[in-house]
Amino acid sequence: MKRNTKDVDESARRISRRALVVGAVQLGIVGGLGLRMQSLQIKQADQFRLLAEENRINIRLIPPARGLIFDLNGRPIAANEQNYRIVMVREDAGDVGEVLERLTKLVPLDPEDLARAMEEMRRRSPFVPVTIADRLTWEDVARVNVNTPALPGITAEVGLSRVYPWGADLGHVVGYVGPVSDYDLSRIDDQDPLLQIPKFQIGKTGAENKLERRLRGTAGTKRIEVNAVGRVMRELDRKEGNSGADVQLTIDARLQSYVQARLDNESAGAVVLDLENGDLRAVASAPTFDPNMFVRGISVANWRDLNENKYRPLAAKAVQGTYPPGSTFKMVTVLAALEDGKVTPEETVRCKGWVDVYGTRFHCWKRAGHGNMNLHDSLKQSCDSYYYEISQRVGIDKIAAMARKLGLGIKHDLPLSAVAAGLAPDKAWKKKVRNEDWRIGDTVNASIGQGYVLSSPLQLAIMAGRLATGRTITPRLIRAIDGVEEPSGLGEDLGLNENYLRRVRAAMTDVSNNARGTAYRSRINVPDMKMAGKTGTSQVRRITAEERARGVTRNADLPWERRDHALFVSFAPVENPRFAVAVIVEHGGGGSTIAAPIARDIMLQALYDGEPPLDAYPSADRGRIAEQQRKIRERVPPGSKGQDRA
Amino acid sequence: MSYLAYNAKYVPTGFRKLMFMNWAIIVLLTAVAGYGFIMLYSVAGGSADPWMSAQIKRFGVGMAMLVGVAMVPIWFWRNVSAVAFGVSVLLLIAVELFGAVGMGAQRWIDLGFMRLQPSELTKITLVMILAAYYDWLPTDKTSRPLWVLVPVMIILFPTFLVLRQPDLGTALLLLMGGATIMFLAGVHWAYFATVFAAGIAALVAVFQGRGTSWQLLKDYQYRRIDTFLDPSNDPLGAGYHITQAKIALGSGGWTGRGFMQGTQSRLNFLPEKHTDFIFTTLAEEFGFVGAFALLILYVLIILFCVASAMGNKDRFASLLTLGVAMTFFLFFAVNMAMVTGLAPVVGVPLPLVSYGGSAMLVLLIAFGLVQSAHVHRPR
């Protein structure tokens, strides 16, 4: 078949026409593509560039090293310890099971941890390091490092973990750190991104908690590049943070350790206050707990033991516990009366063993009565009747005001978890809180530190300190932060009549130095270190008439929780007071027999800055004291590390 | 038959044919392929292996085949059109049967040195048979319904087979390529207008029917459409790829992030970065300028093909050239529309740039046909 030229040309022209149409459509589509590219790559370029950067760049925080805590003499009481752990990267390990088997021969591994690590490795991407074992010793890590060729995928990492070299002895003061919990986050208003780091450690109690912001430091950051599945490709840059501030406390760790040892198994609290500057040299509560246990993660059994112990080891009794101050309150009552002019130092009140107040009989602790009592004798022998009488003259409001002036019933600002305010009751308080009128009987009860009056060992030590110096001593727990010293706690003059104060001090001196004083057996036998004090035995229950009739008034006959609290407040040396000590032994019995010897031993330890010579003690006690000192010397407090406590 | 129908005394012979080839197209093809090599080097993280060196070898083989095909007179190719089409359809059926026997979704046949995808081969043979059909058909019969039905069947049969594989991208290319040749051959406007209107109506019906008792697609198919229309609906699922592709493209900006500096591709945020999505890497690293330059190269190839076709009085030759050009256009247009988020992800490679043997060889053979048409055109 031969085609004619006309047909061919016609056909070619038609194809050309249609080709132009198709070409036009194609150009339109190409134009559309070009516009799309222009829109994505030029108009929205910045936005997509940002998204690309967000894709690839992760910002990771570098946790700062936590500030250290030292005692007064620079001994570390909260330190950071290098902590070795072994991590495994699955993709580098090859045969995971075999590598772990070899590892088990080198390092003691908990099968439970191992199972958990295996599970985590299965779940996560093969390049994610998974912790196999934590808190290993340097020896273990060294063994692993030597065998690296046989352990593909295994590396040892070093981190910092908190350690408390003094263990239980400073548990209540420093507190402890722990991982941030949801509860922490809901409770504290803190936007610090560090808190979002899993397992980041923050202070949970004690100074660790109260000084958290200073100790924590600020986070560093590093920007890392990750790929689509999250593998870290490289570090782009890094900005180091600042480690936390170092804190020096006023606590003398050795003295504190001694006090804890001396309180031993009692349920007790004791405070040593330096009268030159208000420094708290020891704030001890017994029984105590080992904060290291919490950092490592406390076991359920240990936690139950702490919680169910009737002596409440977790309560910081020295600052948090409040007790009726008993006879140690008598200085407050008498000073209020003296300052108000309702009684003179020499004026006597007759004690016949009881006082009847509008039909209610109030007994003196001495059934037979003390006879005629003035200020000096009433304090020395702790006669109750004298105070029943003078308190009615001065009234509760003046007594409460004097209590507050001397540091009772007010909250002292300390960086500790729970600092109790105690209670110096007055008429307004009772009306407001109880909605009842104040009765005269309440005043009589309060005059000897019973009834509504409550105070903590800390407050009693402050009271003793203020009486000894006549100045507004306020307690101080932080000596310095980052080398910057905190203001001294030695305050203004209290504005009390110096003559009255001298009278009270003289009476307190006789309490433990006069043969008829209630704490004569706990005297200090060194002429220029004489100790002044006041005993207290506060009831936690009323002695019922029936009990009185049966004769059940001896403590030993009662169950522990109903026995009297034993208290002693003191300062020394009498002439030039340097320390005030307050001791409370919960349900311990008599202040003179239980609390006073403890306070005396602590006072001597503080005065001699270490173990005192035996001849500082009354000669009859020296054999017993020598034995006691030996026991304490040999004691290792729970959770402590001997070599770090030097 | 038609060699003798023309005055062929100027047709070159022997190696002189080489000089009469359309060298502009050869140069452009090489430029595009070279661009591809650079990108394959980049996505391999600065390494010739595993992709670039293999791709260069294939390009060499492909170029040799192009020249070989170009040396053979165009009328030979027209005469074997029907056979070639038949063979490719048989291969498609063979693949379909292998799949049925349980070899999985196998789209290719192993030839030893390469894997041949019959669906790729069909892209040229369909163009060939349609061009041959309209060369044979007297022009006055072109628009008669019966003679329109024949090429429609020719197009739909392989399209149906490919769709069953399932390979939606290739099916779309076959359908649109075939339809374009029918249009070019002079089939009446009204047919196209009718099909177009019917298509629109079907689309409307699909969307209007959603959620009613006569809904036309399955729910998951609607969800796929939703994802295409708004990838952010499903940022970690199917929408993830297209979102990441757009981020890569967009972050390129005017001049790109620099060779081998594209974070989206280097850090594996991009899917299929050496095959279907290679354009995103290119656009990320070389920016709008680089991406647009590639587009210009493609357009130039089309233009030279169209110019060659319009200068060729032979009906088969010009229809074949335009058909190949259209197929080529569909390749890159669909791919670019897909990676820029204008079209759903259907799995069409970027021609001559994406890593892959079949597509490149088939395209180069197709351009060999174009060259043959150019060399052996009546003068």
Image (cartoon, rainbow, N blue to C red):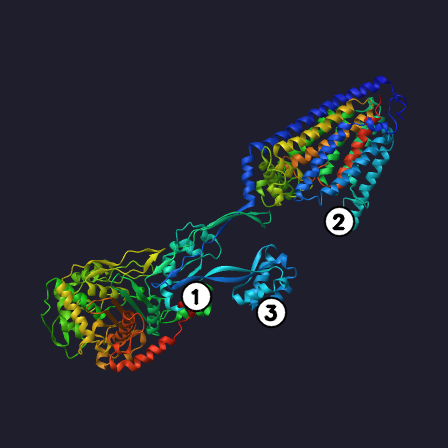
Question: Where's residue A276, x and y in %?
Answer: 25, 62
A66 and B306: which is toward the camera: A66
**Marks 2/1: CA distance?**
62 Å
Question: Where's residue A356, x and y in %?
Answer: 13, 72
The local secondary structure at tag 1 comes to helix
- Label 1 near label 3: C-beta < 8 Å? no
Residue at coordinates 23% horizontally, 76% vertically from top-left?
A525
**Marks 3/1: CA distance?**
28 Å
Counting residues from the start of the chain, the first of labels 3 and 1 encountered is: 3
Quarter that holds the N terminus of chain A: top right
Evaluate whether label 3 is on the same chain as label 1.
Answer: yes
- State the image quarter where residue A41 is shown: top right
Q: Which residue is mark 1?
A: A292
- State the image quarter where residue A336 is shown: bottom left
Residue at coordinates 80% horizontally, 21% vertically from top-left?
A12
Quarter that holds the C terminus of chain A: bottom left
Q: Chain of mark 1?
A: A
Image-based side of A55 in relation to A22, left or right: left
Q: Which residue is mark 2?
A: B104
Q: Does residue A641 appear in this view?
A: no
Q: Does residue B64 appear in this view?
A: yes
Q: How many marks?
A: 3
> Residue flagged by tag 1: what amino acid is it?
Asn
